[in-house]
Image (tube, helix red, strand yellow):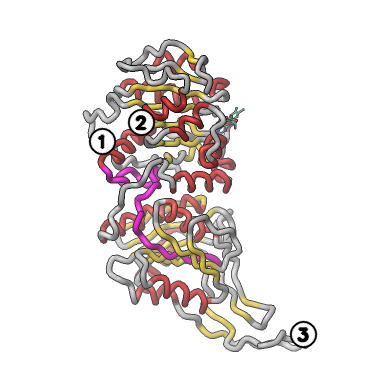
Amino acid sequence: MGDQVPLGARPAAGDRVLSGKRVVLGVCGGIAAYKAVEVCRRLGDAGAIVSPVLTRSATRFVGPLTFSALAAEPARTSLFGSEEVGAGSGAPAPAVPAARSAIPHVELGRNADAVVVVPATARLIGSYAAGISSDLLSSVLLATRAPVLLCPAMHTEMWEHPAVQDNLTLLRRRGVHVLDPAEGRLAGGDYGKGRLREPEEVVAALEAVLVDESSGTAGTVSSRADAGGTLRGVRAVVSAGGTREPLDPVRYIGNRSSGKQGYAIATELQARGAQVVLVTSSPLEPPAGVEVVGVETAAEMAEAVLGAAAGADVVVMAAAVADYRPSAPAPVKLKKSGAPVRLELVPTLDILAELGAHKRPGQVVVGFAAETATGDQLVELGRGKLESKGADLVVANDVSADGASFGSDRSAAVIVSRGSLTDLGVSDKRAVASKLVDAITDLLGAAGVPAPKKGANA
Ligand SMILES: Cc1cc2nc3c(=O)[nH]c(=O)nc-3n(C[C@H](O)[C@H](O)[C@H](O)COP(=O)(O)O)c2cc1C
């Protein structure tokens, strides 16, 4: 992880996508606010008419005067119009000032061609998701119909918090564009995911959003820059969790799978617009908006997955399905006798092999291989599974890696396909999900499965 966002739809040099566009540049209170100054300058250089809107907290980190000096419009810091700072003299002045109204948030929102928030704090993301307009910036976000690009930045713990991720999932579903942060140096000498993307990446992502919106080809922006609807029309089935094979009414043979990886994949697919059925044996809270089918045993998992797969474009077998089950579970609780107990185990149905054998044209089947192997050996095991099961992608995990065992939030994964290999190292399961869904999207695109459609932007 930690690679730069490939900004797939960056317009060719010379295209003046931002020229004459009214851009509200929201700035929140985080260390990365200093980078918003450079974003402001670059937007002005690209011909945008920039209206900076700083939160109260942002003014603790950067001065509004700096933005006013660089932007066409004065920086604003308050819902109550008197607090404009400076003249706003930096870049092309509009014929009609954007927001001299008594209701600045409505004027700014209405007049904007785009709103970009750099950095977007956890607070702003939460307010926006909840529809709470507690200050000028959150009011503008609710008042606008223009495309919105959020560029979050925060410490890794905050970024990975389910509340923040759930809020972003909700916003993406509403058509808001999110430029995921990078992995790198953070404030306070820390390192991890949460670092604001560089100013040139932010500007390129905004250009891509505007091209995307105007051409009606949502999805040409990198999936990580725009998870708003690239998989709209795609039907996906994801399995998650470890199955339980009964020995008697109270005991079972199980495994340590938590279901977190499958849930992360379901969340990612759903965030990109796919219609998702999650077949799960995990007790985790399912992501909002996915259809959940609860199962316990390998046989139940097989029935539910194979049934749903018949109409699906994508099937991801992330569940840890038992390979064997007791041949004859006792109908009543087994009594302790002190004598050894012999168990007969019989193989369960190989769901992935079934899926591979009955794949529909264009359908993408993804398997997981949990191994205790590293490096080339892990890749070979992944390749072997890809071939033997007839899958299109296999995620091979080294479950013996430090901090990446079953049940943890991280995974040591390699994504293997025919002809490519992506080594993710030890990464957050959400990052694995994001990369995997990128690979699935590529395969679907190559197979011509439901072309991405335009996402509605609030
Ligand atoms: C030194 C410092 C750095 C901070 N950096 C961040 C940050 O990078 N991301 C974040 O979400 N919050 C950060 N915070 C917390 C926010 O400033 C705080 O949540 C504030 O209420 C955000 O207000 P705003 O969203 O209105 O700008 C930081 C706070 C301090 C004191």
Three-letter residue code for mark 2: Val
Determine the main secondary structure of the stretch shown in magenta: loop
Q: Secondary structure at mark 3?
A: loop
Q: Amino acid at mark 1?
A: Pro
Residue 165, given in percent of the width and then of the height, sits at 53, 46
> Where residue 212 sits: x, y (%)?
30, 41
**Pointer 2 residue Cβ closer than 8 Å to ligand 1:** no
Residue 203 badge: 2
The residue beneath circle 1 is 11
Q: 334 or 142: nearer the eye?
A: 142
CA neighbours of label 1 inside 10 A, class few (<14), some (14 to 19), many (20+)? some
- Decide whether residue 194 is among the magenta residues: no
Q: What is the spatial separation of the Cα atoms under label 2 and label 1, in whole angstroms?
A: 11 Å
Q: Quadrant of residue 355?
A: bottom left
Q: Quadrant of ligand 1?
A: top right
Q: Nearer the viewer, residue 109 or 258?
A: 109
Label 2 with label 1: CB-CB less than 8 Å: no
Q: Quadrant of residue 161?
A: top right
Q: Position of residue 442 (x, y in %)?
A: 31, 55
Name the spot of residue 8 as percent of width and height, x first.
Answer: 30, 42
Residue 382 at least partly seen: no
| Mark 2 crowd level (few <14, some 14–19, many ≥20, 10 Å Cα) | many
Numbered disc 2: secondary structure:
helix
Q: Which residues are magenta?
A: 216-241
Please give the name of the residue rendered at 52% of the width and 23% of the height, measured from the top-left corner.
79
Report the amino acid beneath label 3: Lys
Q: Find disc 3 in the rendering and name its residue.
A: 336
Relative to 434, say whether 344 is above or below: below
